[in-house]
Image (cartoon, grey):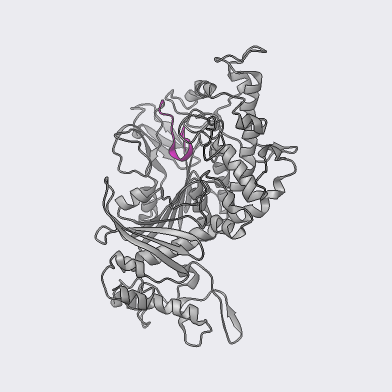
């Protein structure tokens, strides 16, 4: 078998019977699961151009490449002919995958991973596309495979093979994959890998995932020798940015996409918005590195409690849920308890602290007005958002530890400083306190063109009948709920209005939820939600999700996440999360911890 794979190179996807192939393409030769009219770029993830009789064909099909005298060079012909070469029926062994030959790809390892702690065993294949775009493919045994592909990713600058959906993918029988998008991540989690390296920037921006998914599909179908029936992408945070990029630039890559807690504009978020929060919270670089935040960590819960005290009952229920934060007209100058002039006690806020809280929530502005959305009130005390919890917190963080890999106190400071230094200005000594909101915005444009998925034109996805589920927590201080909401509003305006857009894209906004489903353990926040099943039903059964039930779970033996379905802990509250702009409304009777007691109403 290894010899066959070596000689036939790709030898992929021949699991369809000759009869089925003839039905799909009567009179044509056996093309395995591919058809002659498929575009070369769609299969291999990269463009090709051929010339015949003086005419350039910039979008050739497989048949165009394979045709005798068709103008394709020998390298392209070999790639296509290898792809279409016949192979013996039956699934390959995992060991065989180490000998797999793919154009522009090196397979570096293939190993069987035994089942462990409830995760089924799988075949793990690692390959490298081009110079350094590494990807990992994980495939359950043939008997367990559901015929589908689910790709995932990590967060931040990416740079490793983290796959946030690997566990649930294998549990449900998916083949899954992830990529580092073409660069290593340093120990400090920053962006030094991007210094003066436009190729890495482009690969991180969009090209790395596009190439990785194309080759992952080839590996999967070589292993099973069957066609993938449906392909999905589930990205969160940094890979949520990638999910939107796929929907915008490569709408034929996946039939369904989930963009959860997505970074809509990396350059504006981590070049502008987070510079705004950090200049306010740490007025000088010395304040940050000596950890002198204007608002101390000890007062974050007091702020959060004050917001809930004013806005919790606006939806008719006092239940630790601010259903619509846009209706919450919180004013720190009047709604917080202010200290007397010259005092700074633990039970009140100074004038400076209240001013900074208001400034941060308002969002960045220049001499002409606001230049980027601000942040909704409520949920500042969600672990990791302002201070508490793992990761140090986004806005205030925790004191930097001497000798730690990262010298930054807060996640906002790390992401902003590293973005400005290595992605925008290519100056490793740049200090974010130098950023001028009136004059420095044009400096973002070059990087933005490569890494920001902020084009609301999704006509390509709509034309291909692809589906997009977007999601964000109202209390997300990593990406900003108002940013995601405003971008969806732009999608609606650009793609024919609410009705037309709802045919292929929907947004779900989670009350009280922080970044990527984080929640305050002191509140019954419904933050566990199964988007994958909703997407499957939409793509495969044409059941568009008007709402999706979310749960509050009392964890059993560990924390629950939206991708850890089925739920193993005790569910003590469920609520419908309505497709934006509708909101969950209490029917007036019934258990307030039961989703059936609520209905979706227009906001």
Numbered marks: total: 0
As drawn, 105 above or below 284:
below
Can you say which quadrant of the picture contains the N terminus? bottom left
Whole-percent x and y of residue 187? 51, 45
Please indicate whether residue 136 sits to the left or right of residue 450 in the image: left
Whole-percent x and y of residue 507? 48, 45
As drawn, 126 above or below 332:
below
Residue toward you, 305 or 21: 305
Whole-percent x and y of residue 360? 62, 31
Residue toward you, 160 or 539: 160
Query: What residue do we see at 39% from left, 33% from top?
Result: 598
Whole-percent x and y of residue 282? 63, 30
**Residue found at the very far front of the displayed protein:** 403
Q: Can residue 373 be seen in this view?
A: no
Query: What residue do we see at 41% from left, 79% from top?
Result: 81
The range drawn in magenta is: 510-522
Magenta includes 473? no
Which quadrant would residue 225 be assigned to in this image? bottom left
Residue toward you, 553 or 535: 553
Q: Is residue 478 visible?
A: yes
Which quadrant would residue 221 be assigned to in this image? bottom left
Query: What residue do we see at 43% from left, 53% from top?
Result: 161
As drawn, 74 above or below 296:
below
Query: What residue do we see at 63% from left, 18% from top?
Result: 350
């Amino acid at each position: 078998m290894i010899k066959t794979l070596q000689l036939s190179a790709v030898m992929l996807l021949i699991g369809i019977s000759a009869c089925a192939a003839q039905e799909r393409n009567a009179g044509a030769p056996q093309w395995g699961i591919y058809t002659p009219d498929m575009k070369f770029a769609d299969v291999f993830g990269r463009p090709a151009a051929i010339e015949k009789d003086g005419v350039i064909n910039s979008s050739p099909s497989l048949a165009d490449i394979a045709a005798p005298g068709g103008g394709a060079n020998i390298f392209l012909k070999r790639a296509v002919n290898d792809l279409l070469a016949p192979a013996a029926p039956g699934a390959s062994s995992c060991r065989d995958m180490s000998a797999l030959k793919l154009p522009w790809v090196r397979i570096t390892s293939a190993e069987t991973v035994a089942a462990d702690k409830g995760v089924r065993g799988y075949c793990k294949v690692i390959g490298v596309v081009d110079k350094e775009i590494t990807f990992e493919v994980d495939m359950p045994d043939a008997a367990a495979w559901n015929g589908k592909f689910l790709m995932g990713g990590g967060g931040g600058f990416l740079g490793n093979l983290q796959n946030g959906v690997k566990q649930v993918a294998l549990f449900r029988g998916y083949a899954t994959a992830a990529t580092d998008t073409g660069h290593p991540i340093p120990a400090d989690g920053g962006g030094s890998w991007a210094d003066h390296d436009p190729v890495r920037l482009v690969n991180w921006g969009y090209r790395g995932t596009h190439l990785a998914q194309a080759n992952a599909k080839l590996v999967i179908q070589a292993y099973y020798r069957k066609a993938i029936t449906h392909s999905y992408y589930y990205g969160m945070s940094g890979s949520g940015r990638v999910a939107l990029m796929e929907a915008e630039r490569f709408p034929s890559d996946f039939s369904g996409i989930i963009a959860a807690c997505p970074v809509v504009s990396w350059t504006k978020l981590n070049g502008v918005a987070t510079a705004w929060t950090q200049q306010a919270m740490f007025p000088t670089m010395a304040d940050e590195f000596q950890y002198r935040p204007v608002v101390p960590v000890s007062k974050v819960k007091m702020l959060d409690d004050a917001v809930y005290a004013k806005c919790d009952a606006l939806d008719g229920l006092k239940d630790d849920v601010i259903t619509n934060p846009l209706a919450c007209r919180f004013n720190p100058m009047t709604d917080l308890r202010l200290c007397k002039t010259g005092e700074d006690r633990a039970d009140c806020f100074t004038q400076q602290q209240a001013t900074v809280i208001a400034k941060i929530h308002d969002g960045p502005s220049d001499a002409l007005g606001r230049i980027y959305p601000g942040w909704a009130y409520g949920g500042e005390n969600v672990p990791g958002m302002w201070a508490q919890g793992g990761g140090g917190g986004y806005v205030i963080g925790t004191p930097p530890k001497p000798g730690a890999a990262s010298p930054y106190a807060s996640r906002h400071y790390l992401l902003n400083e590293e973005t400005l230094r290595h992605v925008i200005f290519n100056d490793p000594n740049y200090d974010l306190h130098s950023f001028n909101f009136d004059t420095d915005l044009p400096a973002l444009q070059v990087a933005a063109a490569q890494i920001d998925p902020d084009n609301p034109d999704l006509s390509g996805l709509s034309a291909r009948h692809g589906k997009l589920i977007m999601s964000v927590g109202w209390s997300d201080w990593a990406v900003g709920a108002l940013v995601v909401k405003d971008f969806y509003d732009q999608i609606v305006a650009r793609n024919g209005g609410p009705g037309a857009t709802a045919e292929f894209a929907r947004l779900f906004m989670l009350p009280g939820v922080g970044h990527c489903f984080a929640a305050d353990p002191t509140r019954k926040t419904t933050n566990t939600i199964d988007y994958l099943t909703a997407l499957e039903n939409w793509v495969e059964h044409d059941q568009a999700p008007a709402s999706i039930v979310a749960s509050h779970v009392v964890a059993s033996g560990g924390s629950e996440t939206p991708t850890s379905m089925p739920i193993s802990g005790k569910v003590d509250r469920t609520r419908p999360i309505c497709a934006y702009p509708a909101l969950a409304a209490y029917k007036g009777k019934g258990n307030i911890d039961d989703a059936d007691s609520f209905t979706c109403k227009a906001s």
